[in-house]
Image (cartoon, grey):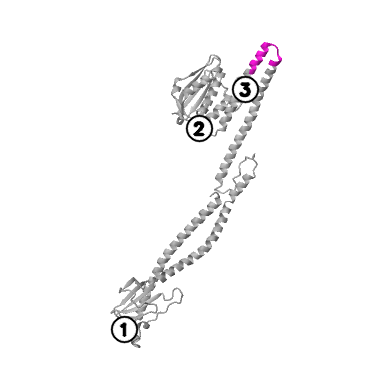
Amino acid sequence: MRSLRTRLFAILLITTGLLWLSATMWIFLSTRAEVERVLDARLMEAARMVNSLIVSPDMMKEEGDGDANRPAQSAIKIPVLEHPHYDRQLSCQIWSLDGTLIGKSDSAPDTTLAPHAMGFSETVINGETWRVFAVENASLGVRVLVGDNLRIRDRLVNDLVKGLLLPALLIIPLLAVLIWLSVGRGLAPLRKLAGDLAAREASDLHAIEDVGTTREISPVLKSLNGLFARVAGAREREQNFIAFAAHELRTPLAGLKTQAQVALSSDDGEIREKALGQIVAGVDRTGKLVRQLLDIASVEASESAKPAGAFNVGEILTGLRTELAGQAHRVDVAIDPHLFGVKIEMDPDLFRLAARNLLENAINHSPPGATVSCTCEMAAGRLVIVINDTGPGIPDEEIPHVTERFFRGRFKTSVGSGLGLSIVERALDRTGAELELRNRERGGLSARIALQQSLIR
């Protein structure tokens, strides 16, 4: 069922119908029990009333002496309410204690209604079940029996229930229409929200005003506004990325073109060779810039890291040392043996990306013959992987800004692009780790990857 309105309508109609049916069954059972009690009370009252009308045996004999051949039942006439369904419901018999029928009502059978002397009983006569109350008058020598045909009792209860069901059957269609209209009215704010969203331009990402919104739709609005904010942020990052990339690529491409023109226009082999060397260096810088641009775009495109099992930190750093050997310029990379005993569980690609950029920065900022050390330590319950260099470090006032894209501080290198630390911070954010930058007392920078205890295996 794809329609929310239809689903709500069906749920409300079914629950209302079941509730109405349960109420009807309860009314039927309670009405039946109450009718039984009322009719039983009526039987008792009728029997006692007839018993009180019998004054003496002599009176009854005088009533019957007129015609010896006439049946005695003509002696008692009980008026009944004229109704086609309930006419002659009560039947009365008066028997002497010796078993002689003294009198009966017109609707009473000739057979005794009950063999019991006193109280209630049920008797089947000619296929009909009778509910009978008997009163025995020992002083007069008679027993009064007043009976109720249960078939007529059941008809009375059924008629009562029909009287309740017929209005219900007439009301249910009206109730269904009212439920349908009410559900439609209740979903009007949702239709309005859908209409507002449909009328929006693709570039309109401002938050929807949560004014006068129903309580049930308010969480949807908050989620939509959060989505709009994330999309707006991603769009802004994309625009900035394109603008920054265009700006950063323009300069090296222009330099490459200039050096190529110099090489083509000069007949001096030394000048040509120098220009070609500049072209090679420019291609390296541009290639690194393009790689870092692709890296940061890849990191920002992924919403979250995907853990791929535990990996050995020392092995990752060893592979990066080999990979960066061509850029080391006589800078040694020392890896603490303890790192080979450290295993962490996080996205290995993001960790490798962050560690590569940190190692690359450390190598580029260290002087020839220096050593870049990779160690580990425990601090505040966290494992910290430390990469130390012996370069100039970062001025304290620049540390809060070095992770901004394309920021290049006072001690920038010729091969830098201002993206390395920005890539590191974003990659570690995706994995739940943190980047900490500290200047060393003896000179150089200490780049620290702080890992939560939950990531250590």
Helix, strand or loop for disc 3: helix
In the depicted view, which residue is nearer to us: 373 or 441? 373
* Front-most of residues 41 and 122: 122
Where 183 sits versus 305, above or below?
A: below
Viewer-proximal residue, 208 or 267?
Answer: 267
* Amino acid type of the residue tagged 3 in the rendering: Thr
For label 1, the crowd category at 10 Å Cα-Cα, with few meaning under 14, some 14 to 19 and many 20 or more, is some
Q: Residue at x 39, y 77 (%)?
A: 107
**Number of residues whose C-alpha sits closer than 10 Å to that of mark 2, classed few (under 14), some (14–19) or many (20 or more):** some
Q: Residue at x 70, y 18 (%)?
A: 261
Q: CA distance from mark 2 to mark 3?
A: 30 Å
Q: Secondary structure at mark 2?
A: loop
Location of mark 2 (residue): 306
Q: Which mark is residue 57?
A: 1
* In-image side of 255 versus 422 (left or right): right
| Few, some or many residues within 10 Å of mark 3 (<14, 14–19, 20+) | many
Residue identified by numbered label 3: 286
Residue 266, horizontal then vertical, whole percent: 70, 13
User: Where is residue 208, by image quadrant?
Assistant: top right
Q: Position of residue 449 (x, y in %)?
A: 50, 26
